[in-house]
Amino acid sequence: GIVGVFGYGGGIVGRYADVPAQFPGVEHFHTIRVAQPASKYYSTENLRQLMALWEKHGSGMTNFHGSTGDIILLGTRTENLEPFFWDLTHDMGQDLGGSGSNLRTPANCIGQSRCEWSCYDTEECCHHLTLHYQNEIHRPAFPYKFKF
């Protein structure tokens, strides 16, 4: 990509204004994809911490959830990417989602946690797939996207 964080090829969608003089507040307006927890279960504490982090490093605008299932954080400048990434991974213990042109962040239904008729542990499957394909999610190597 045109912009990112050290060691990752995904998770950041770089966006620059073609005419920055006409739009001085958004000449950089990068999007960050944060991997969602299994079945999208969040604690209030986690959401507040994430929103405080985004207010500190970004625009404060979000999109829960994008087509990838990730938490979409809209609008930050290039110089804020590494500090945000450090705080996200070290202070919160969360990771970037996938934004490459191929493998995105795995997502799953709520499965056994809320469905009494569930015949398969979808959360375990999603967790296993995420760990197995973590390198491909963060360092895209294929020519175009594929889905499971």
Image: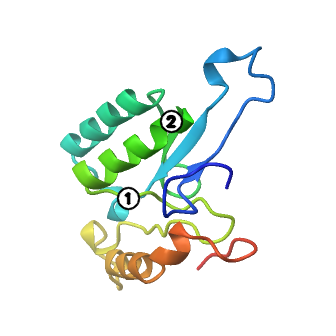
Q: What element carries label 2?
A: helix
Task: State the quadrant of the N terminus.
Answer: bottom right
The amino acid type found where label 2 is placed reads Glu
Q: How far apart are marks 2 and 1 (CA)?
A: 19 Å
Task: State the quadrant of the C terminus.
Answer: bottom right
Nearer to us: label 2 or label 1: 2
Q: Is residue 3 above or below residue 26?
A: below
Q: Residue at x 63, y 75 (%)?
A: 147
The amino acid type found where label 1 is placed reads Asp
Which residue is labeled 2 in the image?
A: 79
Locate residue 75 relative to residue 21 in the image: left or right.
Answer: left
Q: Of 26 and 42, which appears nearest the observer?
A: 26
Locate residue 8 relative to residue 49 in the image: left or right.
Answer: right
Q: Residue at x 48, y 54 (%)?
A: 70
Q: In this view, does 85 lie above or below 100?
A: above
Q: Of 122 and 19, which appears nearest the observer?
A: 19
Pinpoint residue 111: horizontal percent, then vertical percent.
Answer: 34, 72
Which residue is labeled 1 in the image?
A: 95
Q: Few, some or many C-alpha atoms within 10 Å of disc 1 (few <14, some 14-19, many ≥20)?
A: some
Pinpoint residue 51: horizontal percent, then vertical percent.
Answer: 33, 34
Q: Few, some or many C-alpha atoms within 10 Å of disc 2 (few <14, some 14-19, many ≥20)?
A: few
